[in-house]
Image (tube, rainbow, N blue to C red):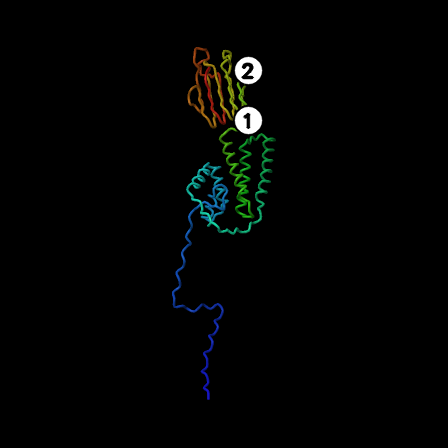
């Protein structure tokens, strides 16, 4: 006769959904601290020039395009963007290369962004409008007007590309174009761009009537020799405007003439009657002529030079 087995224990009742887990005898692990931030390094993957903006983007989480736009803005407004970028390039070490022999799997490439093409189209339209305004109105925009308008359009395109983040190729070309326009605008703001004749020119009028009110040269050295001009019958000062783009300017006046000089020199030295006078001044003549030292200048010279030395001397 066999004995019956004892009844088995009933299975545990299923817990209702959403019920909290049973308490554990072990204490909960402490919360993990913030993930340590890596070292600031120049990027090897996201780079246009030296990888500075890409490195800042990886370190801060801010899009690299915004860093590039900020560098261009600093260059235009304060002229310090290039200096700041160069310092960061020197101070930031380059990111280490991947281990040799290990193939790095690249993510699939996104479709190309339409932002650069649209930006260039808008740029051409804006330049056409600026040209019409410059030709059909009295507005004298000059090179800075054209370059500034172009740089504004490129800047807007960079911002749109950074905000939308649509596709690839929305930054490298526009950033390069923005850098070139920035350099050209800085040059145009400092140096008077060439306009007028090209090649060395020498003018030597013999009478007051033969003196031209304006002497202009685009590229080359300009010499205006006034030593033979007869000053005895002058009823008013001889006013002369001299404009030079790139090249030296040399003006010679009679020793007896009182001369008023105004010099606006972009890049180069200005020497007026043996003195380093970049702003000019009034200089009495020498000798015993009736017009010498009478406080009424015989010549009023206004000299504007973009790139080159300016010298005013006596015969």
Q: Residue furthest bottom?
A: 1
Q: Residue at x 42, y 48 (%)?
A: 39
- Tag nearer the camera, 1 or 2: 1
Mark 1 crowdedness (10 Å alpha carbons): few <14, some 14-19, many ≥20: some
Residue in front for this viewpoint, 163 or 136: 163
Upstream in the sequence, badge 1 or badge 2? 1
Q: Residue at x 46, y 38 (%)?
A: 82
| Picture coordinates of residue 214, whole percent (x, y) | 54, 21
| Picture coordinates of residue 175, whole percent (x, y) | 52, 41
Horizontal side, residue 28 vs residue 110: left or right = left
Horizontal side, residue 32 vs residue 108: left or right = left
Q: Distance between the Cα atoms at labels 1 and 2?
A: 23 Å
Q: How many marks?
A: 2
The circle drawn on residue 210 is: 2
| Picture coordinates of residue 118, whole percent (x, y) | 59, 42
| Residue at disc 1, secondary structure | loop
The circle drawn on residue 278 is: none
Residue ID for mark 1:
195
Q: Residue furthest front?
A: 101
Residue in front for this viewpoint, 103 or 141: 103
Horizontal side, residue 196 vs residue 255: left or right = right
Q: Where is 117 relative to 258, above or below?
A: below
Mark 2 crowdedness (10 Å alpha carbons): few <14, some 14-19, many ≥20: few
Q: Are marks 1 and 2 in contact (CB under 8 Å)?
A: no
Residue in front for this viewpoint, 6 or 269: 6
Residue in front for this viewpoint, 263 or 110: 110
| Residue at disc 2, secondary structure | loop
| Picture coordinates of residue 156, whole percent (x, y) | 54, 42
Q: Where is 262 relative to 84, above or below?
A: above
Q: Where is 307 relative to 43, above or below?
A: above
Q: Residue at x 51, y 38 (%)?
A: 179
């Amino acid at each position: 006769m066999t004995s019956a087995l004892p009844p088995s224990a009933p299975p545990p009742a299923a817990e209702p959904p959403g019920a909290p887990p049973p308490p554990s005898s072990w204490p909960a692990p402490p919360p993990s601290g913030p993930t340590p931030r890596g070292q600031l390094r120049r990027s090897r993957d996201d780079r246009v020039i030296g990888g500075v903006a890409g490195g800042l983007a990886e370190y801060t989480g801010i899009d690299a395009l915004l860093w590039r736009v900020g560098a261009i803005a600093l260059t235009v407004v304060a002229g310090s963007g290039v200096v700041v970028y160069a310092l960061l390039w020197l101070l930031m070490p380059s990111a280490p290369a991947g281990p040799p022999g290990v193939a790095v799997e690249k993510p699939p490439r996104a479709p190309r962004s339409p932002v650069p093409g649209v930006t260039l189209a808008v740029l051409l339209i804006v330049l056409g409008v600026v040209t019409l305004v410059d030709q059909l109105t009295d507005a004298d925009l000059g090179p800075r007007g054209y370059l500034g308008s172009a740089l504004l359009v490129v800047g807007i395109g960079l911002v749109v590309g950074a905000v939308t983040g649509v596709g690839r190729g929305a930054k490298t070309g526009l950033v390069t174009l923005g850098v070139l326009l920035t350099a050209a605008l800085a040059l145009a703001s400092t140096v008077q761009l060439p306009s007028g004749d090209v090649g060395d020119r020498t003018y030597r009028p013999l009478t007051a009537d033969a003196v031209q009110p304006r002497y202009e040269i685009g590229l080359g050295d300009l010499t205006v020799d006034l030593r033979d001009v007869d000053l005895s019958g002058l009823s008013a000062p001889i006013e002369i405007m001299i404009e030079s783009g790139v090249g030296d300017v040399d003006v010679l006046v009679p020793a007896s003439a009182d001369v008023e000089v105004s010099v606006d020199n972009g890049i180069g030295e200005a020497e007026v009657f043996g003195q380093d006078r970049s702003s000019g001044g009034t200089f009495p003549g020498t000798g015993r002529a009736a017009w010498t030292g009478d406080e009424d200048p015989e010549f009023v010279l206004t000299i504007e030079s973009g790139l080159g030395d300016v010298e005013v001397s006596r015969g």
